[in-house]
């Protein structure tokens, strides 16, 4: 069993690196099987939150093994509380047990159950079997416990990575939803309506007016697409965030809305994640002023003071009732997106607006990581 000590390092390496949760778990399970001279080892993960049922996820067997395993393990409440939730490994030298039905076919006479518990939560269970009676000396028991801890940490890390990926995907989905909803979808809906009207056979003045609205809707959709492509190509020039925001203002001014830019404080090169947030919030606020507010003038200011960067975008447009903006369900995807981006770097986003009084968006961004 002393040879199993070397498996601790191999399992550690197996759980580090790229790959899916299944790939990482399969490598680690294989190392555990070799270290403990097991015929078959299987990892079960919770099937449904709050239900004492586990579903087979990864199986590792010796090439000569003819043992199969069941797809699910079920426990009653008492067995779960006394055995699985405790996190302690259990050895059985009988085909059946009080814990759960023997998961192996043919039923194993020597098998173990290793709960994977972290922070009071059961992340999964490893079940393993051998043809020979499995005997754990103190060293072997420690090796088994350490391997279980490593696999538990690996599963927890892989799940966290998956959660981060899901968050990034959701953020990107929100960004795309905002860009499609705020302009393009509306233009295309208008174009579809006018096409239906023209197909109905209208004539004379009604036909000419419909053609005019259709041309304008298509032209507007084209402008939205071109504007978004320009926004995506904005780079951060040498000199830091100031020149980047100034370039964005210049791009919008060229499209017809005068934008006045001012900067106070020292020139800074801030971390990439904070630069990205400042750039995207400024772009989104200017896009709203251009497409929805009917603004004739926009002021953008950038201030650096007291370890904080403040970006303010003010327009003289139509404004709206800011208190009525609840989220994406209300059609304000762009505003929701700005708040999400600010929150991602512990920044504060303030929005002030009222009908007929214009809109002010202010981003207060801490310069230090927090």
Image (cartoon, grey):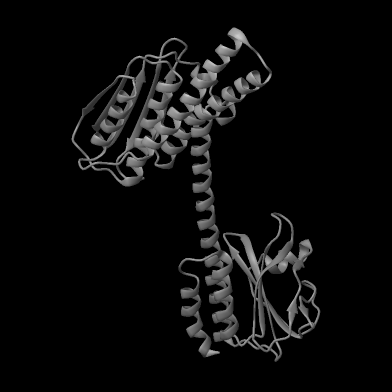
The percent coordinates of residue 68 (x first, y second) are 74, 79
- Residue 267 image offset from top left, x and y in percent: 19, 37
Q: Can residue 326 be seen in this snapshot? A: no
Q: Residue furthest left?
A: 266
- In the rendered image, the quadrant that contains the C terminus is top left
Residue at 30% over, 25% down: 254
Up/down of 15 relative to 93, above or below: above
Identify whether 352 is placed above or below 79. above
Does 98 appear above or below 130? above
Q: Residue 317's quadrant in the figure?
A: top left
Q: Is residue 177 visible?
A: yes
Decide if residue 367 is on the left or right side of residue 173.
left
Q: Quadrant of the N terminus?
A: bottom right
Which of 201 and 65 lies nearest the eye of the viewer? Answer: 201
List x then y, in percent, for residue 241: 26, 38
| Whole-percent x, y for residue 140 in the image | 57, 85
Going 39% across and 42% down the picture, which residue do you hit?
345
Name the foreground residue: 240 vs 37: 240
Q: Residue at x 46, y 13 (%)?
A: 354
Nearer to me, 217 or 53? 217
């Amino acid at each position: 069993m002393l040879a199993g000590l070397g498996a601790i390092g191999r399992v550690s390496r197996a759980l580090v690196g790229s790959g899916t949760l299944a790939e990482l778990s399969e490598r680690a399970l294989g190392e555990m099987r070799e270290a403990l001279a097991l015929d078959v080892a299987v990892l079960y993960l919770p099937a449904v939150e709050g239900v004492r049922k586990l579903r087979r996820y990864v199986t590792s067997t010796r090439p000569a093994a003819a043992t199969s395993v069941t797809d699910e393990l079920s426990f009653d409440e008492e067995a779960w509380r006394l055995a699985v939730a405790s996190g302690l490994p259990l050895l059985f030298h009988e085909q059946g047990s009080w814990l759960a039905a023997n998961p192996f076919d043919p039923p194993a006479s020597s098998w173990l159950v290793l709960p994977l518990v972290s922070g009071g939560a059961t992340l999964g269970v490893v079940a393993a079997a051998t043809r020979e009676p499995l005997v754990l000396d103190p060293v072997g028991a420690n090796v088994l416990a350490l391997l279980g801890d490593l696999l538990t940490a690996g599963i927890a890390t892989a799940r966290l990575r998956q959660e981060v990926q899901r968050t990034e995907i959701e953020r990107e989905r929100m960004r795309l939803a905002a860009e499609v909803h705020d302009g393009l979808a509306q233009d295309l809906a208008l174009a579809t309506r006018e096409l239906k009207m023209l197909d109905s056979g209208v004539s004379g003045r009604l036909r000419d007016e419909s053609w005019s609205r259709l041309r304008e809707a298509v032209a507007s959709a084209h402008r939205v697409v071109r504007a978004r492509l320009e926004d995506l190509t904005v780079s951060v020039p040498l000199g830091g965030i100031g020149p980047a925001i100034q370039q964005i203002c210049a791009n919008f001014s060229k499209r017809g809305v005068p934008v006045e830019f001012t900067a106070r404080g020292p020139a800074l090169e801030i971390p990439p994640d904070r630069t990205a947030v400042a750039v995207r919030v400024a772009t989104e606020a200017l896009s709203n002023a251009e497409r929805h507010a009917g603004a004739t003038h926009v002021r953008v200011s950038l201030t650096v003071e007291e370890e904080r960067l403040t970006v303010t975008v003010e327009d003289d447009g139509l404004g709206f009732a800011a208190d009525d903006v609840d989220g994406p369900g209300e059609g304000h995807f762009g505003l929701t997106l700005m708040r999400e981006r600010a929150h991602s770097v512990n920044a504060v986003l303030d929005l002030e607006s009222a009908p007929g009084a214009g809109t002010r968006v202010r981003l207060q961004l801490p310069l230090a990581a927090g």
